[in-house]
Amino acid sequence: SQKIEQNSEALNIQEGKTATLTCNYTNYSPAYLQWYRQDPGRGPVFLLLIRENEKEKRKERLKVTFDTTLKQSLFHITASQPADSATYLCAPTFDTGRRALTFGSGTRLQVQP
Amino acid sequence: SQTIHQWPATLVQPVGSPLSLECTVEGTSNPNLYWYRQAAGRGLQLLFYSVGIGQISSEVPQNLSASRPQDRQFILSSKKLLLSDSGFYLCAWSEAGSMETQYFGPGTRLLVL
């Protein structure tokens, strides 16, 4: 069965550095992959979507890459700020006909001032 | 613009009591609707999704059920709550015919004692 793996350990970085989060999947390549941000006690919020024919997508300080050979997506936050502290979830969409997303368990990012 | 509402925000219920959580979406027609549960410190677990009125797909067997009596209304129910039903329940919607970006409600925190 399909597996989605995100680093369960929290990532701690200093303000101003670049945070890099990883999402790995097994077996089939997704048609596209999304990244969401979740703050404690809140619902996830959509950040970026990248399609299988795209290598990279950017939005302000955010960048997502998609490597179908490595079966991996990287999510980067440049010039990180304490306000970026949250849990980040990846959600690959596989062309299985199932009309729903499967989310990874998320990686918690803590940006220290 | 579209908005999604969930209520109640928090709920404390005794074991064996019934449950009804409601979710409504405004500003869109025929959305796909989803119910997720998130245990403390864990990832999102998809419970049910619906692509239309009266059409419910169940992802995991359990003592919960879902109904969609109206186009933009999604209800999560149980006849008898278990301790293991405690968690953070999130409703989400996506555009009709798409499962791309999902938009989440504020969530309901349920504690079963």
Image (cartoon, rainbow, N blue to C red):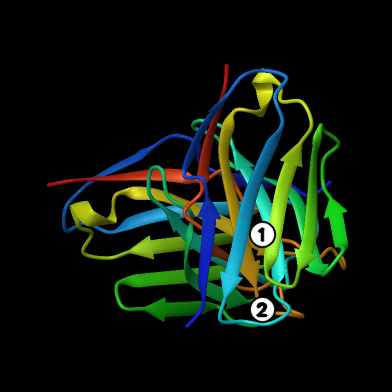
Q: Amino acid at mark 2?
A: Glu
Mark 1 secondary-structure assignment: loop
Tell me what residue is drawn at x 28 percent, y 59 percent: A18
Above or below, comparing residue A98 to residue B81 in the picture: below
Q: Determine if residue A69 is in view.
A: no
Give the x, y percent position of residue A9: 44, 34
Q: Amino acid at mark 1?
A: Lys
Reading the image, the residue beneath label 2 is: B95
Same-chain check, marks 1 and 2 = no
The one nearer the camera, B65 or A63, is B65
Above or below, comparing residue A87 to residue B40 in the picture: below
Tell me what residue is drawn at x 68 percent, y 64 percent: B73
Residue A68 found in image quarter? bottom right
Above or below, comparing residue B47 to residue B94 in the picture: above
Reading the image, the residue beneath label 1 is: A71
Among all residues in the image, which is located at the extreme left? Answer: A113
Q: Nearer the viewer, mark 1 or mark 2?
A: 2
